């Protein structure tokens, strides 16, 4: 599967972070879908079947923990990465990984590191 057929679901309520992620990821050729909160993500995942999910932790309605829990309960094959300012909070990290999180990157992040981590998750899933 080539990069331009890889579907990434971005679950984020910050317009600035969405714009940054869109800029970085669309330049690489990924197909992007945006969910503004965890509730919207949970509603679209069954039909979209993304190849990877990038989610924030703190969002309205349902947060990142609920997204991780949903994905790992019903779609174990979909890797999930938290992109969050809470990346240095040990309790948050532990809870996220206990729920089945595959990777985490802290805001602000290095674009090259983000892309490398995404590619690693996709290779582990045998997408690329």
Image (cartoon, rainbow, N blue to C red):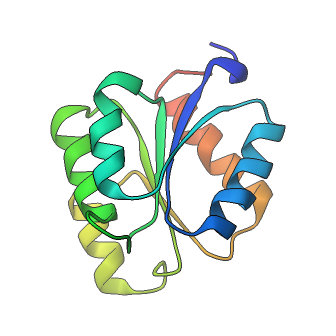
Q: Is residue 57 visible?
A: yes
Residue 66 placement: quadrant? bottom left
- Look at the picture and state if 124 lies above or below 89: above
Residue nearest the viewer, comparing 39 with 49: 39
> Which residue is depicted at the point 64% across and 18% down?
5
> Which residue is depicted at the point 45% across and 65% down?
56
Please identify the quadrant where the N terminus is shown: top right
**57 lies left or right of 117:** left
How many numbered circles does the render carry?
0
Q: Residue furthest right?
A: 27
> Which residue is depicted at the point 78% across and 50% down?
24
- Look at the picture and state if 15 lies above or below 76: below
Q: Whole-percent x and y of residue 38?
A: 33, 56
Please identify the quadrant where the C terminus is shown: top right
Q: Whole-percent x and y of residue 51?
A: 48, 29
> Which residue is depicted at the point 34% across and 34% down?
45
**56 lies left or right of 41:** right
Q: Whole-percent x and y of residue 20?
A: 74, 60
**57 lies left or right of 88:** left
- Look at the picture and state if 20 lies above or below 115: below
Q: Which residue lies furthest to the top in this view?
A: 1
Q: Can residue 100 be seen in this view?
A: no
């Amino acid at each position: 599967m080539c990069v331009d057929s890889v579907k990434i679901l971005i679950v984020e309520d910050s317009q600035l972070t969405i714009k940054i992620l869109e800029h970085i990821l669309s330049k690489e050729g990924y197909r992007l879908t945006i969910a503004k909160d965890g509730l919207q993500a949970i509603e679209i995942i069954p039909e979209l079947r993304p190849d990877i999910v990038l989610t924030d932790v703190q969002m309205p309605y349902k947060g990142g923990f609920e997204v991780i829990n949903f994905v790992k309960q019903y779609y174990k094959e979909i890797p999930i990465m938290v992109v969050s300012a809470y990346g240095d909070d040990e309790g948050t990290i532990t809870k996220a990984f206990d729920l089945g999180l595959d990777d985490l990157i802290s805001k602000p992040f290095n674009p090259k590191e983000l892309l490398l981590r995404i590619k690693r998750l996709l290779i582990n899933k045998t997408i690329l």
